[in-house]
Image (tube, rainbow, N blue to C red):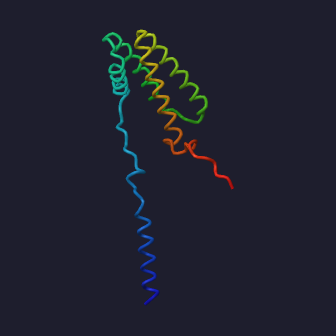
Amino acid sequence: MKKAILTIAIAVMGFTAAFAQDSSRTSRKQMPKMTAEQRAEKATSRLEKKLSLTADQKSKIYAVELENAKKMEAWRKTDHSDMKGKMNERKTAMKEQKAKIDAILTADQKTKMEAFRAEAREKGGKMRKGLNRGDRTDKAPVEG
């Protein structure tokens, strides 16, 4: 009788521990598949809101973004065996895109764009650091 109760208690504890994990947190929401045109339109509209673009600027930036989106789509479909070379190629393409966009913008818009880019770099840095979970500068070292 004691063995049966003990076995049931262990089984209940095991099932409780197994199902206590919140699986909804680990599953990521699937991003919708967008075409290159949709990606370019989304990026252009975001810049239009942030920088108050004129109609001419909007059409030029859309062309730059569309070209970039098509490059990215092709890059995703290619073989990723030479990742270092591909990453250097991607960095070069990003610099070219930045230069093209900066050539279209006015001085005031460039200032806003730089602030926007700095904010994005800061957010990216926080994401790479694990959402500030590893930041332990405020704690004193433990002495033994």
Up-down: is 54 above or below 133? Answer: above
Residue sitting at x 32%, y 21%:
49
Residue in the image at 46% along x and 13% along y: 100
The quadrant holding residue 41 is top left
Given residues 112 and 143, the one toward you in this image is 143
Residue at the far right in the pictured view: 144
Above or below, 139 relative to 104? below
Compared with 44, 27 (above or below) is below
- Residue depicted at x 34% and y 26%: 42
Residue 85 pos. (x, y %): 60, 28
Query: How many marks do you count on the picture?
Result: 0
Picture coordinates of residue 123, whole percent (x, y): 47, 33
- The residue most toward the bottom is 1
Q: Quadrant of residue 43?
A: top left
x then y, percent, for residue 56: 33, 10
In this view, the residue in front, 121 or 95, is: 121
- The image position of residue 109, as x and y in percent, is 40, 14
| Residue farthest toward the left in the current orientation of the protein | 55
Location of the N terminus by quadrant is bottom left
Image quarter in which the C terminus is found: bottom right
